[in-house]
Amino acid sequence: MWMAGGGRQAGTSHGLTDEFGFAPVEGHAHIHDVQATILHLLGLDHTRLTYRSQGRDFRLTDVEGLV
């Protein structure tokens, strides 16, 4: 994933993949953590960004997500 601006440090790489670039080997981040970080950089609180469907509140990062 490539992100520009938003307060991210330039030239930072996170984790390693296998020789094909398919599966993470070390330092992997869960998708909920990535989405929570992107929402934080956009100035949104991922815990308050909810929508109601079939009587239940849902959010993009579910009950997880660490910035």
Image (cartoon, grey):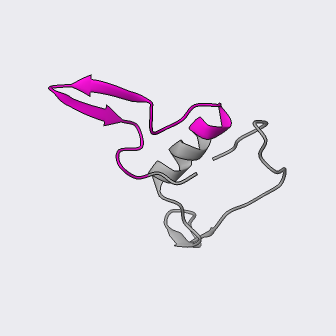
Q: Position of residue 53 (x, y in %)?
A: 21, 25
**Residue at point 45% right, 32% down?**
48
Image point (69%, 44%), residue name: 2
State the image coordinates of residue 24 (x, y, percent, origin top left): 52, 68
In the image, residue 3 lies in the stretch drawn in magenta: no
The residue lying at 52 percent from left, 43 percent from top is 35
The picture quadrant where one finds residue 26 is: bottom right
Answer above or below: position of 38 versus 28. above
- Place of residue 41 in the rendered image (x, y in percent of width and height, measured from the top left): 67, 38
Residue 44, placed above or below residue 37: above
Of residue 26 and residue 32, the one placed in the foreground of this image is 32
Magenta span: 39-64
Residue 40 within the segment the image draws in magenta: yes
Rendered residue at 52%/54% (across/down): 66
In front of the other: 56 or 15: 56
Counting every numbered tag in the picture gives 0
43 left or right of 22 in image: right
Image position of 50 (left or right of 8): left
Residue 46, x across and y down, in percent: 49, 38
